[in-house]
Image (cartoon, helix red, strand yellow):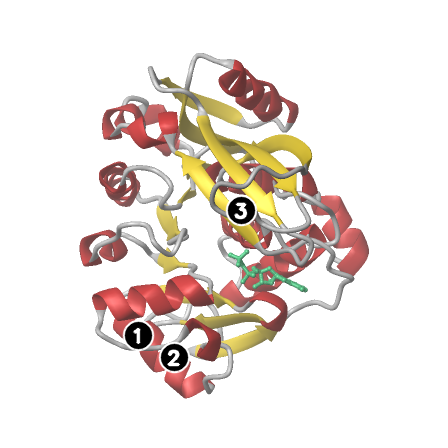
Amino acid sequence: SVIVVGSFNVDHVWRCAELPAVGATIAGQYATGPGGKGFNQAVAAARAGVGTAFVCALGDDAGGALARQLAAADGIGLRAEASDQPTGTAGIYVDARGRNCIVIGAGANGTLGAAHVAADPELLAGARVLLAQLESPVETIEAALALAREAGVATLLNPAPANAPSSIGLLRLADLLTPNETEFAALLNRHVGERVEAEAVAALDGASLHALCRKLLPHGSVVVTLGSVGVFVSHPDEQLRGDAQTHYRVGAESVSASDTTGAGDAFNGALAASLARAPEQPFAAHVRYANRFAALSTERAGAAAAMPRHDEVQERFGA
Ligand code: ADP
């Protein structure tokens, strides 16, 4: 099974012609729904067909009730810490060109404690993969990764969002790191003094990308997601995870993408699920599955709601 440790948000989205200027009052089309990288990734893992637990913190409010209801609907084992803060929220403005401004009210997500993660030893006992992001307190994520390590559970860290605090100590606890281009550039700049522009990452040659990945995570594998370009995989020399090469690219599947919100979340949840389902398979097979799963998620609107199911992935791309 997969354990996801992370955030749940109630997203409030306003679509407007222009983003509001300072002091302006404007009209927009409103929609609300679930979000948070943790929850999105938990839904992806569950729909990929693997038993999934989601460790998070929720307020005693309508948002918390929504999380419980939606987790149950997807068969996710919810391990929610009761917070005295409101459930996490995101206020999102999107303009006609798809550009956005986002305010996150971390609320309960900001109080998720290491003690809550440690409170349930049985949680780790049956798990193969622990998946975390950086929308929760960094000490809590560190503690969760450390506990998983101790229990022999593989650790997958999606270092998102790019501006979240992180440390070399945190990275050392990850067996697998899955940054997108922006997060990759941010981590390189911050932790290994490599100045790389996010926009330049996808165009780098394989040997250069591999060298950067090795500097960033010497002991573990790095999967850089490159949006519509696909992904880049880099392994340490001594640990190829069943692959024939230390580094390679996998091209994106050609789909009619209409909304790439949550594509990264789809990729991470599906990668964790595939690793947990068939750990004996070569790593490239897991990457291929996650790449297909994420591609399908872009054909539908929304994040959690857009996650496909395992049988849909198989029908579309073959087993
Ligand atoms: P994020 O959502 O974190 O920015 P990316 O944009 O890198 O993440 O997307 C994650 C993954 O989703 C990609 O590596 C790819 O597998 C898939 N993906 C994203 N956009 C597309 C697309 N337009 N067509 C096909 N697959 C896509």
Residue 178 percent across, percent down from the top left: 43, 59
Identify the amino acid type marked 2. His
Numbered disc 2: secondary structure = helix
Count of numbered labels shown in the rendering: 3
**Disc 1 marks which residue?**
214
Q: Quadrant of residue 187?
A: bottom left
Q: Nearer the viewer, residue 290 or 67?
A: 67
Residue 220 x, y percent position in the rendering: 32, 64
Residue 33 placement, left or right of 177? right
The crowd level at tag 2 (other Cα within 10 Å; few <14, some 14-19, many 20+) is many
Picture coordinates of residue 149, whole percent (x, y)? 27, 45
Crowding at mark 1 (Cα within 10 Å: few <14, some 14-19, many 20+)? some
Query: Tag on residue 210?
Result: 2
Q: Residue beneath label 3, please?
A: 269
User: Quarter of the image containing the C terminus?
Assistant: bottom right
Q: CA distance from mark 1 to mark 3?
A: 24 Å
Helix, strand or loop status at disc 1 = helix
**Tags 2 and 1 touching, CB below 8 Å:** yes
Counting other residues with Cα less than 10 Å from the Cα at mark 3, is it few (<14), some (14-19), or many (20 or more)? many
First along the sequence among labels 1 and 3: 1
As rendered, which of 139 and 148 lies closer to the eye?
Answer: 139
- Left or right: where does residue 9 sit relative to residue 310? left
